[in-house]
Structure formats: structure tokens, C-alpha cells
Image (spheres, rainbow, N blue to C red):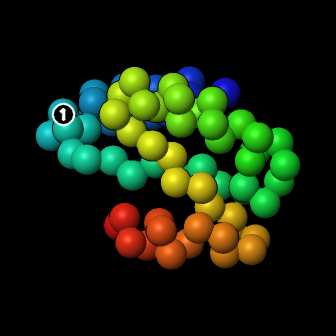
Amino acid sequence: MPLKDFDVINEELEKYSPTLASKPQIVVANKVDLPHARDALPALNKALAKRKLEALPLSGATGEGLGAVLDAV
């Protein structure tokens, strides 16, 4: 699950700069045009909810979700 990678990246970020690591984050789940990625999104969001985060769905191939990601940024 990408959550483990997310945790590793955040640990590295904390080591590099605690100030930067404390800033709000936008999490984007790419490739939602693929069925297995779309199917995994609810479980990812359930895990992220414990951290008060939510993954925004995005498809780089189709552009689906791009507006919501841009709005969040």
C-alpha cells in the first residue's frame, strides 16, 4: 500500500526540515483511471483519515480530478 511509502517520505522530510514537515499537506492519488487504483482509494482514505488527511483522486491520463487538485493547491 502506498501508505508505507507516504510514511517513509514524511520521516525523511522530518529529518530534513521539521519546519517543512509541519506544514499542511495535500495528498494526491494518481492513476484513478485504472480500476485497481480506483478500488484502493477508499482503503487509502480510511487510513489517511486517522491522520486527518484525505487523498484527492487524479488521473494524469484523463485529467479527472485535476480541478480539485488545483483548487486544493
Q: In the drawing, does residue 71 fall left or right of residue 3?
A: left
Residue 45 in the image: x percent, y percent?
53, 36
Q: Residue at x 67, y 75 (%)?
A: 63
Residue 31 in the image: x percent, y percent?
72, 56
Q: Please state, as top left, top right, bottom left or bottom right, where the N terminus lies in the image.
A: top right
Q: Residue at x 76, y 40 (%)?
A: 39
Is residue 39 at all visible to an observer of this figure?
yes
Q: In the drawing, does residue 37 fall left or right of residue 1?
A: right
Residue 49 in the image: x percent, y percent?
42, 31
Looking at the image, residue 50 lies above or below residue 56: above
Determine the image quadrant of residue 60.
bottom right
Query: Can you name the residue that lies furthest to the left here?
Result: 19
Q: Nearer the viewer, residue 22 or 38?
A: 38
Q: Please state, as top left, top right, bottom left or bottom right, where the C terminus lies in the image.
A: bottom left
Label 1 Cα neighbours within 10 Å, binned few <14 / some 14-19 / many ≥20:
few
Q: How many marks?
A: 1
Looking at the image, residue 44 lies above or below residue 24: above
Q: Nearer the viewer, residue 72 or 4?
A: 72
Determine the image quadrant of residue 66.
bottom right
Residue 20 in the image: x percent, y percent?
21, 44
Is residue 20 at all visible to an observer of this figure?
no
**Helix or strand or loop: what does disc 1 sit on?**
helix
Query: Can you name the residue that lies furthest to the right here?
Result: 35
Q: Residue at x 66, y 70 (%)?
A: 64
Q: Which residue is mark 1?
A: 18
**Amino acid carrying mark 1 in the image:** Pro
Determine the image quadrant of residue 12.
top left
Q: In the drawing, does residue 61 fall left or right of residue 27?
A: right
